[in-house]
Image (cartoon, rainbow, N blue to C red):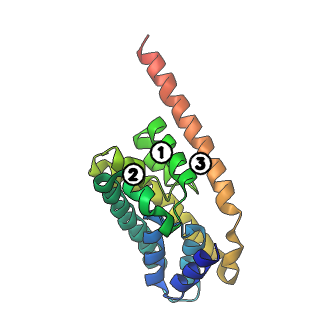
Amino acid sequence: MAILHSITHGILALGIMGVFIGMFLESAYIPVPSEVILPYAGYLVYIHRASLAEAMLAGLLGGLFGAVFAYWIARYGGRPLVERYGRYLLIHQKQMDRADRWFRGHGDGAVFFGRLLPGIRTYISLPAGVAEMPLGRFVLFSLLGALPWTILFTYIGYILGKKWQNIGQLAQYFAVVVVILFIAWVAMLWRNRAKASR
């Protein structure tokens, strides 16, 4: 993880372009922590090196481009390609399996909610690509899922200013909230189907 730490700090040294690159890598199977990249984007706004709109757009577009890149790798190379070369990019089998189970269990909603969960968001493009999920739907659900994550963590980085690195545990609390919302969403769908079948 020391290598990953060094990579992250090297990316941050690039300013707003580093935000784009970092989010691209995070969405393309390389676990660069967006919980660090996005608050730093907010810090760049705080020190007047970028506008809030520029910081959020860099994070959002970087993540979206990375997700599409990862989707195409999975769609045309398949899981065997990612598994064969993934170890060189710090891709872990356990996290890929978790993303795969998540996608098989929840389909389109998995892409949306997967983009909101640490540990899943980096790898959710893999099962979506392997399953040949239509690209338009994949992009739409990826964008919708990445939007609140990007806005929240960038804005909090801006609010924290020089203390932007103190954001650590917030990602875990956010993940818990997302899981609760997801369970509520599934329960609502199940209840509506039960009513329709009567």
Residue 44: x %, y % from top left: 55, 84
In the rendered image, residue 146, in percent from the top left (x then y), is placed at 46, 59
Q: Nearer the viewer, mark 1 or mark 2?
A: 2
In the image, is 68 to the left or to the right of 193?
left
Can residue 158 be seen by looking at this rendering? no
Which is nearer the N-term, disc 3 or disc 2?
A: 2
Foreground label between 1 and 3? 1
Circles 3 and 2, Cβ within 8 Å, touching? The answer is: no
Establish if 129 lies above or below 48: above
Split into 4 quadrants, where in the image is the N terminus?
bottom right
Residue 179 visible in the current orientation: yes
What SS does tag 2 mark?
helix
Residue found at x 48% / y 29%: 189
First in sequence: mark 1 or mark 2?
Answer: 2
Q: Identify residue type, mark 1.
A: Asp
Could you tell me which secondary element the residue under label 1 belongs to? Answer: helix
What is the total number of numbered labels drawn onto the structure image? 3
Q: Amino acid at mark 3?
A: Val
Q: Real-space Cα distance between discs 1 and 3?
A: 18 Å
Q: Residue at x 67, y 57 (%)?
A: 172
Label ID, residue 136: none
What is the distance, in whole Å, between disc 3 and disc 2 at their CAs? 27 Å
Q: Image check: 63 left or right of 178?
A: left
Q: CA distance from mark 1 to mark 2?
A: 10 Å
Task: Give the residue at mark 2.
Answer: 79
Question: Type of residue at label 2?
Answer: Arg
Residue with the mark numbered 3: 178
Image point (31%, 48%), residue name: 137
The local secondary structure at tag 3 comes to helix
x and y percent of residue 169 in the render? 71, 63
Q: As rendered, which of 83 and 186 lies closer to the eye?
A: 83
